[in-house]
Image (cartoon, rainbow, N blue to C red):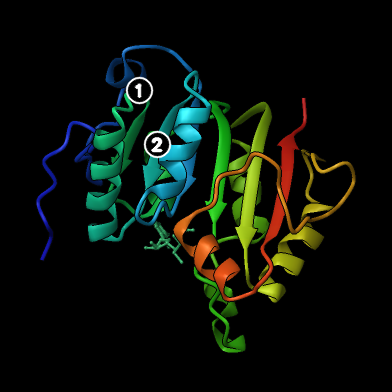
Amino acid sequence: MLIPINSSSFLPWQDGEPPPQWGDIFGNDHPLALEIGCGVGDFVVQMAALHPGWNFIALDFYNKGCLKTCKRIDKGGLSNVRVLRVEARSFIEACILPVSLRAVIINCPDPWPKMRHRKRRLVNTAFVNRLSSFMLPGADFYFATDFDDYGLDVSEFMTRQKGFENALGGDSYRHRLEGYPVSKYMRRFLEEGKQIYYVHYRRSH
Ligand SMILES: C[S@@+](CC[C@H](N)C(=O)[O-])C[C@H]1O[C@@H](n2cnc3c(N)ncnc32)[C@H](O)[C@@H]1O
């Protein structure tokens, strides 16, 4: 059952409805940053406070997570974040204009560790290629995972991904990223002694 979310940070958009008018919703034309799979929202509230000049769209199809994210945003008094309970790929196609995103952030996506399930992973060359058409020149692409195989895969294919420039001084990944907030899953993995793989690229100009 869907938990009702009564928060001005929640956007109850559904498939088939006209795309949200982001300028009207945020009350300004600041650039958009997209977090895919925001979980309980601890990352996006930190990131939105660090970038008050960006409007954040936080997505997750995890119902309780959307509720928790909204509560965090409201508690923090942040006006530059909206939360949607949607599947990322169909939402992007329906609601994001080409060449409009200032940043795309994907932290600790489900790793699908079994070999036969790997094709279910969200982040692959086709998805990043599709994402690139929604990104502004110079837009940031951030990916983080604790899962070695996923981190190595994304960091390796990004070196060959057309339309992106490395933003880590040539390193395909790092285990620390200065100034990048820690999400719930990252914190959990760090406490377990695991390393996070951070991948950071920019859309070419
Ligand atoms: C492992 S959790 C990580 C949550 C958070 N990013 C963090 O680092 O704490 C992955 C999240 O991505 C969401 N998710 C996975 N695939 C998604 C998709 N296609 N569209 C929207 N959300 C998705 C899941 O519901 C889940 O909340």
Please indicate, yes or no, whether residue 109 appears anywhere in the rendered image.
no
Ligand 1: give its quadrant: bottom left
Question: Which quarter shows the N terminus?
Answer: bottom left
| Three-letter amino acid code of the residue under disc 1 | Trp
Label 1 beta carbon within 8 A of ligand 1:
no
Q: Nearer the viewer, residue 45 or 201?
A: 45
Q: Residue at x 22, y 50 (%)?
A: 67
Whole-angstrom CA distance, mark 2 to mark 1, is: 10 Å
Horizontal relation, residue 6 to residue 106: left or right: left
Question: Is the Cβ of the residue at disc 2 closer than 8 Å to that at disc 1?
Answer: yes
Q: Position of residue 101 (x, y in %)?
A: 54, 30
User: Residue at image x 22%, y 45%?
Assistant: 14
Q: Is residue 67 left or right of residue 149?
A: left
**Disc number for residue 188:** none
Residue type at mark 2 is: Ile
Identify residue for label 2. 57
In front: 26, or 52? 52
Please, what secondary structure does the residue beneath circle 1 have?
A: helix
Q: 174 above or below 147?
A: above
Q: Nearer the viewer, mark 2 or mark 1?
A: 2
Residue 77: x %, y % from top left: 28, 27
Seen at 56% across and 70% down, the residue is: 191
Quadrant in the rendering for residue 132: top right
Which residue position holds label 1? 22
Q: Residues within 10 Å of mark 2 (few under 14, many from 20)?
A: many
What is the residue that sits farthest to the right in this orientation? 170
